[in-house]
Amino acid sequence: MKGQLMRTAAALLLVLGVSVAYAAPQKATKSSQPSKAQAQTYVGTVDVSKDKAGDVTAVKLTVGTKLKHSFNVTLDKKGKELAEKMAGKQVHAKALTEKKNGTKWLTVEEYSAVTATKQTTPTSEGTPKPGTTKTTSTPAKTTSTPAKR
């Protein structure tokens, strides 16, 4: 009885040791590979810093209305193009997010200017204020003809 208990315990320890040894390298492999980032769309204002010679030294995208947050923009080809063409403007930017030394960086893939839209505000009489448009909807008239037999 005691011998059988010892064999069972040894077999369990062997199985446990093999499973731990097998699982440990897999876990290390997964954590050592960088995770693939997906592009996200950000809407914000492009802030550009230049040196005395006029060369771009830094680009930031400031997002949010109440709680503003700034992201550093990678100064690759698209980042420099964004700085040159959209400085001080609001943009939609599709970018990959990466954290470097505790700071979030955006690598811009594509961007476009934000276009302003007018909102309509009717007055109490139902007529639009100057500079706005009024939209009304009327039900469509339907006519029916008797089916021929």
Image (cartoon, grey):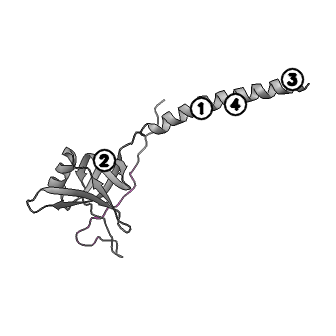
Which of the 4 quarters of the picture holds residue 27? top right
- Identify the secondary structure beneath mark 2: strand
The disc, 2 or 3, on the residue closer to the chain's N-terminal end is 3
- Identify the secondary structure beneath mark 1: helix
Q: Residue 138: x and y, percent?
A: 37, 57
| Distance from Cα at disc 1 to Cα at disc 4 | 11 Å
Q: Residues within 10 Å of mark 4 (few under 14, many from 20)?
A: few
**At label 2, which amino acid type do we have?**
Lys
Q: Which residue matches tag 4?
A: 16
The disc, 3 or 1, on the residue closer to the chain's N-terminal end is 3
Front tag of 2 and 4? 4
- 13, above or below 59, in the image: above
**At label 1, which amino acid type do we have?**
Ala
Q: Residue 140: x and y, percent?
A: 38, 51
Asked if the residue at tag 4 contacts the one at tag 2, i.e. Cβ–Cβ closer than 8 Å, the answer is no
**At label 4, which amino acid type do we have?**
Leu
Q: Which residue matches tag 2?
A: 94
Which of the 4 quarters of the picture holds residue 32? top left
Q: Which residue matches tag 1?
A: 23
Q: Residue 149: x and y, percent?
A: 49, 29
The disc, 1 or 4, on the residue closer to the chain's N-terminal end is 4
